[in-house]
Image: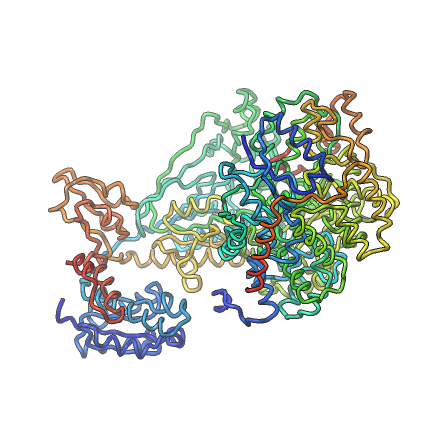
Amino acid sequence: MRYAYYPGCSLERSAASYHTSAMKVADRLGLVFQEVDDWNCCGATEYFAINLLPAYALVARNLALVPGDLAQMAVPCSACYVNLKKTDKYMGKYPQLAQRVGQSLAAGQLGYRPGGVQVRHLLDIIVNDVGCDAITKGVVKPLTGLRVAPYYGCLIVRPENGFDNPEYPTSMDRLLRALGAKVVDYPLKAQCCGGHMTQISEKVAYELIRRLLHNAAEYDADVIACVCPMCQLNLDAYQGNVNRHFGTDYRIPILYFTQLMALALGLSAADAGLGSEIVSAQPALAKIAVEVPQEEDKKARKRADKRALPMPTMPDEEA
Amino acid sequence: MMGEKIGVYVCHCGSNIAGKVDVEEVARWAADLTNVEVSRHYEFMCSSLGQELVENDIQEKGLTRVVVAACSPHMHERTFRGACARAGLNPYLFEMANVREHDSWIHDEPVQATNKAKALVSAAVHRVTYHEPLEPMQAKINPATLVVGGGVAGIQAALEIAEAGYPVYLVEREPSIGGHMAQLDKTFPTLDCSACILTPKMFDAGNHPNITLLSYSEVEGVDGYVGNFTVTIRKKARFVNEELCTGCGICTEKCPKRVIDGVFEAGLGYRKAIYRPFPQAVPKYPVIDAESCIYFERGKCKACQMFCPTEAIDFEQEDGIVTVEVGNVILATGYDLFDTRKIPQYGYGRLANVFTSLEFERMVNAAGPTAGSIVLRDGVTTPGSVAIVHCVGSRDKNYHEYCSKICCMYSLKFAHLVHERLPGTEVYNFYIDMRTPGKGYEEFYHRLLEEGTHFIRGRVAEITDAVRRPGEEGKIIVQAEDTLMGAQRRIPVDMVILSPAIQARHDASHVAHLFGISCSHDNWLIEKHPKLDPVATMTDGIFIAGCVQGPKDIPDSVAQGAAAAARVLGLITQGEVELEPVRAIIDEERCSGCRICNNMCPYHAIDFIEDPGVSRVNPALCKGCGTCVAACPSGVVTGAHFSNEQIMAEIEGILVSLDGKEPIPEVEALTA
Amino acid sequence: MMASGNGQPSSPGTFFEEVIAKTPGGEALRLCLQCGTCGGSCPSGEDMDYTPRHIFAMLAANMKDKVLRSNTPWYCVSCYYCTERCPQEIPITDIMYTLKRMAIAQGLYEDADAPDWSQTFIGMVEQFGRSYELGLATRYHLTHRPLGKIRLGTFALDMLRRDRLALTPSSIRNTSQLRAILDKAKELEGAQ
C-alpha cells in the first residue's frame, strides 16, 4: 500500500521520535510512505486566525504537491490532519472558496481539484488498512501488563472524521489491545490538551493538562499513548510546570502510539525513538521487559448483591 | 372539443394569492383564451358566494367546463366538483389550477408569479377541454375493522367501535396489550396511577364480545381497498395452548432461566424465559421466549411442562396464519425510545447511575423491579441528588430535529416523584426551554418550583465521572452552561435520568409500505391534512392514531384513537363509499397479452384473462397511478382523467402562455 | 421567515451579517437556540469573558466592540467539541476564527498576547514555509512577555537537552512559489 506522506513541521525536530517510529513501523507493516516534496507548514491553529484565504491556500499547496499517482495522504499530526482534510472538504463544499484557492495556487503554477487527495490520519491507516489482526500476527514482544491510556485529543476525531466516534473513539484502544497492552478506558480520552493555550494563558493551559494527567493517574495508567505532537508536547514537556503550579507529582510518560507499536513489533528502543521524552519512560517500560502475568479482568467481578439492577450493555464492549 | 364554454375563476384567497399574484390581470388575460366564455376573480372562491358564482354561470351561461385557479386540489377540488354537480354539470368536467402552493406561496417576485399563474390557468383551460364526464363507482363497506397496535390509542379506538356494535380485530405484537402506558407509574399532571386507569380498559378490550384480540401477532400482508381489505396476520407461536392455560403462573415460577427484560422492564429488571410481561397482562396467557428457553437451546429442561397443571405447554406449536376481511384499518403502532448510547458524552451504559426515563418509570412503579424504591444501580443506595436531563436526542439536528413534546412534562413528574419519595433530595432539571402547553401543565411546573426543584437553563454538554475539583469524588458530574447566568457549571449528583426523544418505531416505514401510506423523513406516518384531517391518510380506509403520527401525550393519543374510530364508524354507517373513477382501461381489441402490466401493478389490480388472452383492470382495485399506462409497450392502456390528450394539452397550455408565442411544433407533433 | 428561508440577510451590512458572510457555512448562526451546549462543552469556557453562546446573542445584537474586545475567541483551543455537539450544526470553531481575524483587522483586541502569538507564528511560516519552535517562542516571549522567559527557560532547556528544539529554521526550497501563492490569496481576500 502506497501513500503520500506529510510529516508536518513538528516531526522534523520536536516530535522526531514520532517520525522515526512511524517510518520503522510502516516499513515493518509493508506500508510505503512517499514524503510530499517541498511540503510547507499547515498553518497550525494560527493561520486561520489571521487570513482566511491565504490559510486555505497555504494548506492547499501541500495537496497540490501530491503526485498524481497517489490518491491518499498519510498524516501523523492531528493538527495538520484537520487542516488538510478541512481544506479539501470546504473546497468541495464551497465552490467560491475552491475557485479563489485555485486562483491563488495558479499564481505558483499549481492546481488542486477538491477530492483529489484523500487525507487520512496515520492511526486510521494502521487500524483500518493494515488491521488489528495483521498487527497481532506481527507482535513478537507483546506489551503484556503495561497499562496504557490511549489519548486521542481533539483533532483526530473532531470535526467528525468518519473513521471513529467523535466523543468516544476506540480505534487506538483496539490497536493497543492487539499489541497485548492493558487498555485503560478513562473518560477524558478525547478531551483537549490545551493546544496553543500554553502560549496564551498558562493558567488555563495547565488546568487542561492537569485534568488529563489526573484522570489517567486515577485509572493507574503506566503510560499515555498519543497521536499528535501538540498533545505529546503539552503533556510531556509541561508536566513539570503543571506539577510545580499545582504542587502535584505526576510522572506519567507520554509516548506516541507508533513507539509502543515499534516495541511490540520487536524493534529496538532506538528505532522506537525512545529517550527524547522529558518524563522518563524507563520505569513504565521496565514492566514489559519483565513478563508480568496478565491481569485479571476486573469487569468479570460478580455482583455483590442480588438486589443489584442490570447494567445496560454497550454494543462495542470489550469481552 | 370546439364550442366548449369554459368558465375561469381566479381566487384571491384573501392576500394568500392576491398578495403576490395580480389576480385581476390573470382573469383579464384568461378571458381571451380559446373557448373561455367567462373569466372572473373573487376574494374567496371556496365561500358559498364563490361557489354560487360558478353554479349561476353554469346555469345561466351554459358553461360546459369549469377551471378554478386557487389552492391545492387536496384542499378544495371536492368543493368545486360539488358546485358543478349541483348545477347539473358532471363534476369531472372541472379542473383546478394550483396558484397558491405552487405559485404565490413560493415565489417572491410578483410579475413572475403572475406569469406563472397565467401559465397554470392556461394549462388547466387546455386540459379541461379534453375532460370527459365520468361516473364514480360504489364500494360496499365491510363493517369489521382492523386495529393495529394495542397501546392506549389502539385500545380506545377498538373499544369505541366495538361499543357501537361492530366487530374489531385488535392486533398486538407483544404478548400483552397495554403499550408504553402500562409501563408508567403516574401520569402528568394529575398524578393518576397509570395502571389504575389503563387496566380496566385493557380488560374490556380483552373481553369485549365484539373484539377479537390477536396478541403476539403481526400483520404480514394487506390487499384490497376501502371497505374491502383482506389482511394476513401471523400469530406467533406462544408455545402455550390458550384453550388449556388458566394463567396460574406456575410455569413462570418454575422456569429456571432468568433474562434481562429489555421490553416491559426497559432493561431494569428480569423476567423468566416463559413469562407474562406483567401481572395485569391481557391476555393472561404467558409465552415462551424461544431464544432464551433452555429447552430450545439444549433440548432438555421442560420444567414448565412438567409443572403445568393443565398440560397447556406445547413445544411443538408453530406460527399460525390468520386471514381477516375488514372494511377499515386503524394504525396505532406507537413509538420507540431514542437509544441514548448514541450520545456517548451522556455516559449511558458506561456510568452505572445514568438511567433512561423508562428505566426510572419502572423503578418508581410499585410493581417494578425495586418495588417503587428510588435507588442507584447497586439496588440499595438512595441518591442524595438527582439530575434530570431534558432534550436527549430531541431538538438536535444530529439526531432528531423535532421537539418530543412530552419530555418536559414527564421530567417535571420525575422531579416531583423524587421530592415525594425522598424528601430532602436535591433535584436539578436541565432544560433548553420549558414547554408546558396543556390543561393544568403550567400549573404543575409552578408546583415543582414551589417544591424547590433546581432549574438550570442549559442543554447538558457532558456527564462524566472524571473528577476535577474537590466534592466531585464518587459522584457523576453534569456539566452545562447555566445560560441565565452565562457561566459553565458542574453539578455533582448521585443519579442522572436522561429524558430521551420519542422516535418512530424502527419498522414504521415498513408498516407504511405494507398499508400503502407514506411517512415523513423521520418516519412518522403522514396524516391526510395536518389540521383538518389529522387521523385520515391519503389512502381511503386507512386511519392513524397516537404516536405513530408524531409525539403525543396520553390525552392526545386517546383523543386520536376515538377520532379515528368516529371516522371509521361514519364509513360503516354509510354502508358504501364512492370511489374515484380515475382508473386505467385496457383496450382489449389492441392488447397483445404480453402481461408486462400484470406484474408492474403495485395494487395487483390487473388480471390476465386466458380467453381471449388479454389483460383486464379490476376497477375496484385500481388506484389510477398510471404505472401500467407508461409500461404498456403497445400503448393501449388509457388512464381515465389522465389520458395522453389531456396531459399533452396541459403541457401545450403552459407552452403557449410563454410570451404569447405559438406552440412548439414538437409538442403539436406529439399530441397529433 | 420568508426572507431567512431564502438565505437573504435580514439587515445586510450589520456586524452579525458580516460574521456570517466571512465564515464558510456561517448562515447556520441564524439558527442558534441559545441552548448553551457550546458554553457547557468548552474546555476553557470557565475562563472566557463570555461563553460562545453569550457571544452569539451579542452578535445578534450587533455588539461589535464588546465581542471583538472579548478574550473569548482567543481562548478557543480549537477542540471542536462545540461544533460537534451543536444541535443546530453551527460551525462554532470557524466562527471563533472569523472573530479573531476581525479583531486583528480592526485592532480591537484587548489581550495582546494571543493575537501577537498568531502573528509571530505566521510571520515565520511566510518567511520559511515552515515553523521552528525556538525562534518563534524566543522572539515571541522576548517581544511580548519578558517576565515569562524564565519559565520558558526551563522548558526550552529540557527540550534542548533532548534535542527537540531547532535552533535554526528549516526552510522549503521553493519559497518564492509559496510567496506568490500567498500574495495572490491576500490580494483576492482584500478585493472581497
Q: State the image coordinates of residue A199 (x, y, percent, origin top left).
A: 77, 52
Residue B667, quarter of the rendered image: bottom left
Residue B123 vertical placement versus B504 (above, below): below
Residue B375, quarter of the rendered image: top right
Residue B521 vertical placement versus B261 (above, below): below
Say which of B583 and B656 sits in front.
B656
Left or right of B57? Residue A169 is: right
Residue B122 appears in the rendering = yes
Q: Residue at x 65, y 31 (%)?
A: A23
Say which of C188 and B280 sits in front.
C188
Q: How many marks?
A: 0
Q: Residue at x 58, y 29 (%)?
A: A31
Say which of B18 and B597 sits in front.
B18
Say which of C168 and B35 sits in front.
C168
Q: State the image coordinates of residue B606 (x, y, percent, origin top left).
A: 23, 44
In the picture, the quarter occupied by the N terminus of chain B is bottom left
Residue B432, quarter of the rendered image: bottom right
Residue A282 vertical placement versus B577 (above, below): above
Left or right of B36? Residue B548 is: right
Residue B307 appears in the rendering = no
Left or right of B502? Residue B653 is: left
Q: How is the image coloured?
A: rainbow
In the picture, the quarter occupied by the C terminus of chain B is bottom left
Q: State the image coordinates of residue A110 (x, y, percent, origin top left).
A: 52, 48
